[in-house]
Image (spheres, rainbow, N blue to C red):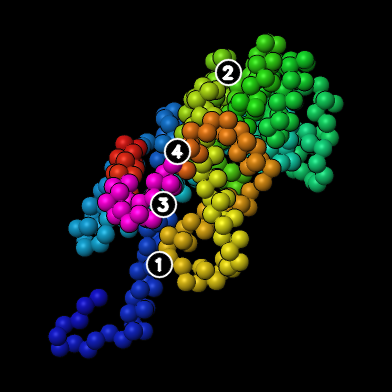
């Protein structure tokens, strides 16, 4: 709103009323956009097309950024808005496709460890696909699904068996399952695969259909748009394809890895990232400073780090201990980190600004290049 030189200036109340009108129009346009996206999703489903079109998403974001910049706004504002709208649209389409796919209609699934957080997620996900879900778990507490206290009491006639127990327990379960060789597809959802190698091999040698899956997200994930699911080969390509099919109606990115490569990558993606954040949280709490007090005078960097660290240390410590023990067998990531920390401290203590700058600049350049390739 603008006023001519001779006209009275609008009051704050009038400007706020106009702002309310604009906000209402924005919400109306968002609703119209979502309805249009839903219609596109219906048409894509009718044509048998995939849920995501990365080229189209990039085109939408780039066009929005150009438009924002032409209006004197920062392009990243448009990018943030459009990325959030796209994510919400994909989540809605994904939920509709999962229910409509009826992938598990007429099929049954047993989730061993189904009262655990990830086991419960798998049970609810399979239920959405249409599976008749049963869980086996001796832990106390209620469940949405029929419960067996001991999986051994099951006839194991299910079409799908998911093992969602702790790593060592999962390996023992697979060794026992191999003796009975269930007819359905069997897969684990372990964060590491080396501790499961013996059990996976036993199932394979017994002639079972066996695969290994690693959802790269926590049990709080509602939808899979933008998430990664790792499909780890055990030598049974048909079983791996069946496991992949379970997630084909989602917007998740499914990535195939072999058993050895998986744990090597996890030493960085899980092992080092968890260790750094746990160490940050432990160091912070040992100082005697209240996190809330520090937050009151903190920087944006500290706030971001604190959020991530708080989330990490709120997870299951026994599971995270297993991950650290497992990734410690390949100390390359930890050695690289301690070496980098020592190089930075040496530069700081010796007053070597050039060395510190070179380390930081090189890291910035390589991370930026990696982001650009992605």
Q: Which residue is mark 2?
A: 234
Disc 3 crowd, CA 10 A, few/some/many (<14, 14-19, 20+): some
At 38% from the left and 56% from the top, the residue drawn is 349
50 w.r.t. 310: above or below: above
Q: Nearer the viewer, mark 4 or mark 3?
A: 3
Which of the marked residues, 1 or 3, is nearer the chain's N terminus? 1
Relative depth, front residue between 364 and 105? 364
- Whole-angstrom CA distance, mark 2 to mark 3, is 43 Å
Q: N-terminal of the two: label 2 or label 1?
A: 1
| Residue 355 location (% of width, % of height) | 30, 49
Q: Residue at x 35, y 69 (%)?
A: 22
The residue located at (68%, 32%) in the rendering is 167
* Mark 4, residue position: 336
The x and y percentages for residue 208 are: 68, 14
Badge 2 vs badge 1, beta-carbon distance below 8 Å: no
Q: Dot 2, crowdedness within 10 Å: few (<14), some or many (≥20)?
A: some
Q: Is 257 on the left or on the right of 66, as rendered?
A: right
Report the Cα–Cα distance between label 4 and label 3: 14 Å
Q: Which residue is mark 1?
A: 24
Specify start and end residues of the magenta stretch as a single range.
339-359
Which residue occupies 65% across, 41% down?
321
Neighbourhood count class around disc 1 (C-alpha, 10 Å): few under 14, some 14–19, many 20 upward: few
Residue 246 screen position, x and y as percent: 57, 28
In the displayed structure, does residue 199 sit left or right of residue 239? right
Foreground label between 2 and 1:
2
Q: Is residue 268 above or below residue 197?
A: below
Rounded to the nearest angstrom, the CA distance separating label 2 from label 1 is 54 Å
Label whose residue precedes the other's in the sequence (2 or 3) = 2
Q: Secondary structure at mark 3?
A: helix
Q: Main secondary structure of the magenta part?
A: helix
Work out whether mark 2 precedes mark 4 in sequence or the reverse, and give the earlier one.
Answer: 2
Helix, strand or loop at label 1? It is helix
């Amino acid at each position: 709103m603008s006023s001519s030189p001779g006209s009275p200036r609008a009051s704050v109340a009038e400007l706020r009323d106009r702002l309310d009108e604009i906000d209402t129009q924005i919400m109306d346009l968002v609703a119209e956009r979502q309805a249009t996206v839903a219609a596109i999703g219906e048409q894509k489903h009718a044509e048998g097309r995939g849920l995501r079109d990365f080229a189209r998403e990039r085109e939408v974001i780039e066009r929005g950024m150009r438009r924002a910049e032409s209006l004197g706004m920062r392009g990243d504002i448009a990018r943030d808005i459009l990325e959030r709208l796209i994510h919400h649209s994909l989540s809605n389409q994904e939920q509709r496709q999962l229910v409509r796919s009826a992938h598990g209609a007429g099929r049954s699934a047993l989730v061993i460890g189904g009262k655990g957080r990830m086991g419960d997620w798998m049970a609810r996900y399979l239920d959405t696909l249409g599976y008749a879900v049963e869980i086996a778990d001796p832990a106390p507490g209620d469940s949405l699904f029929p419960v067996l206290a001991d999986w051994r009491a099951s006839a194991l006639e299910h079409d799908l068996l998911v093992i969602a127990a702790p790593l060592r327990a999962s390996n023992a379960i697979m060794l026992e399952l191999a003796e009975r060789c269930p007819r359905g597809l069997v897969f684990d959802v372990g964060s590491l695969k080396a501790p499961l190698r013996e059990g996976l091999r036993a199932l394979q040698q017994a002639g079972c259909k066996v695969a290994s899956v690693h959802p790269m997200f926590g049990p709080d994930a509602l939808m899979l748009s933008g998430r990664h699911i790792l499909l780890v080969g055990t030598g049974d390509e048909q079983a791996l394809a069946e496991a992949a099919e379970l997630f084909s109606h989602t917007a998740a990115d499914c990535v195939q890895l072999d058993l050895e490569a998986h744990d090597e990558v996890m030493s960085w993606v899980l092992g080092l990232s968890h260790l750094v954040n746990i160490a940050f949280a432990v160091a912070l709490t040992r100082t005697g400073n209240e996190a809330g007090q520090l937050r009151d005078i903190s920087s944006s960097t500290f706030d971001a780090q604190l959020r991530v660290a708080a989330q990490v240390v709120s997870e299951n410590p026994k599971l995270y201990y297993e991950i650290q023990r497992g990734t410690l067998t390949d100390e390359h990531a930890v050695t690289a980190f301690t070496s980098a920390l020592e190089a930075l401290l040496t530069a700081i203590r010796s007053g070597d600004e050039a060395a510190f700058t070179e380390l930081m600049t090189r890291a910035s350049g390589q991370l930026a290049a990696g982001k650009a390739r992605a």
